[in-house]
Image (spheres, helix red, strand yellow):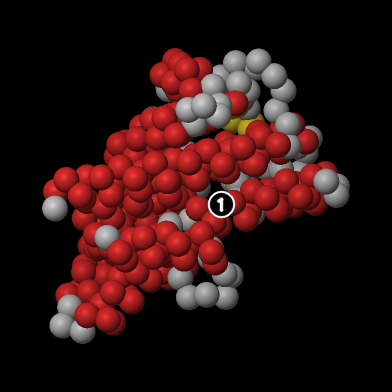
């Protein structure tokens, strides 16, 4: 429990320095190597589909067993064990990173639309070169909302129930999805199993995130509307999970998210989430970051209460 608290504090204070060694960077290199290798030997779409399953199967085993083995070997050395355990937990959490990337876009909007588009391009898959300020804000708010689940609550959830090995396994699953889980011609076969696996593992965390966002926003944002929109528009997304945190944020802030985006030069039609009670503004970026931290703090409080009961 102490390791988790220290890890959250470290994430809050230092985030993810670009030059710092990070397991997710290694995960990305492994996935990229596997993809290139398996594309060379796959001669049909069916073989690409099987390759995607192989990538998921191998990486789930690796990402769980390696940290499990490391921590098992370090158990006799208590100080080293806790240092490594804390470090690995810290690398699973991305709240400060999300905040920093979102605020870069917020600040860039005060300089020029080109700067904001450029900053946004680092955190979204959609094409940004044509976006106006409102669309840039929408993309940023959606990304922070979605990644409050993927990058904060989900890893904490899996760490809480299965320790670092399960948390690292989740990070590998989420990284596979972010690299391969697209529906375009290039990825729809090799990325099928990575995407579906991510959907399964985010099923509970996404819904939990939406609930935490709403409950933690009592007395500050429109909690009644947050629950209303989250439930009403929960299916207004191609993902079975993303509409829960996005719906919560849209309802809490009384704004509308969703809509069409351009990916790899093609327009992808998406339904709307929320009601346009008011127009999106730059300040909604900061508000969404605040909602993210509120959800994280509430999760931590609930976790501590449960641990207290169990003890």
Judge whether residue 233 can be spotted in this image: no
What percent of the width, then of the height, locates residue 107? 76, 50
Residue located 27% across and 60% down the image: 1
Q: What is the quadrant of residue 281 in the picture?
A: top right
245 or 131, which lies in front?
245
What percent of the width, then of the height, locates residue 30? 40, 68
Q: Is residue 63 left or right of residue 22?
A: left
Residue located 72% across and 23% down the image: 279
Relative to 156, say whether 143 is above or below: above
Residue located 20% across and 49% down the image: 308
Q: Is residue 192 left or right of residue 248?
A: left
74 or 121, which lies in front?
74
Element class at badge 1? helix
What percent of the width, then of the height, locates residue 65? 21, 67
Q: What is the quadrant of residue 34 in the picture?
A: bottom left
Q: What is the quadrant of residue 215 in the picture?
A: top left
């Amino acid at each position: 429990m102490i390791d988790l608290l220290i890890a959250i504090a470290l994430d809050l204070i230092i985030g993810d320095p670009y030059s710092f060694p990070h397991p997710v960077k290694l995960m990305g290199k492994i996935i990229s190597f596997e993809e290139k290798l398996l594309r060379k030997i796959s001669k049909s779409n069916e073989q690409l589909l099987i390759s995607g399953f192989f990538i998921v199967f191998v990486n789930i085993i690796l990402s769980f067993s390696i940290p499990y083995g490391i921590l098992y070997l370090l158990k006799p050395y208590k100080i080293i064990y806790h240092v490594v355990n804390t470090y690995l937990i810290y690398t699973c959490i991305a709240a400060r990173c999300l905040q920093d990337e979102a605020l870069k876009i917020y600040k860039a909007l005060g300089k020029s639309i080109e700067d904001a588009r450029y900053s946004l391009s680092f955190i979204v898959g959609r094409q940004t070169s044509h976006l106006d300020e409102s669309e840039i804000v929408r993309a940023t708010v959606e990304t922070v909302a979605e990644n409050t689940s993927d990058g904060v609550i989900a890893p904490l959830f899996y760490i809480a129930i299965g320790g670092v090995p399960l948390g690292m396994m989740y990070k590998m699953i989420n990284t596979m999805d972010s690299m391969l889980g697209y529906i375009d011609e290039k990825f729809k076969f090799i990325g099928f199993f990575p995407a579906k696996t991510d959907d399964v593992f985010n099923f509970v965390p996404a819904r939990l995130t939406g609930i935490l966002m709403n409950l933690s926003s009592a007395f500050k944002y429109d909690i009644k509307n947050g629950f209303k929109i989250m439930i009403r528009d929960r299916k207004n997304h191609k993902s079975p999970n993303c509409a829960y945190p996005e719906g919560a944020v849209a309802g809490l802030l009384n704004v509308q998210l969703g809509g069409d985006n351009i990916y790899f030069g093609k327009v992808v039609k998406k339904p709307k989430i929320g009601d346009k009670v008011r127009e999106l503004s730059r300040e909604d970026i900061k508000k969404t970051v605040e909602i993210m931290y509120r959800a994280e703090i509430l999760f931590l409080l609930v976790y501590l209460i449960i641990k207290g009961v169990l003890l």
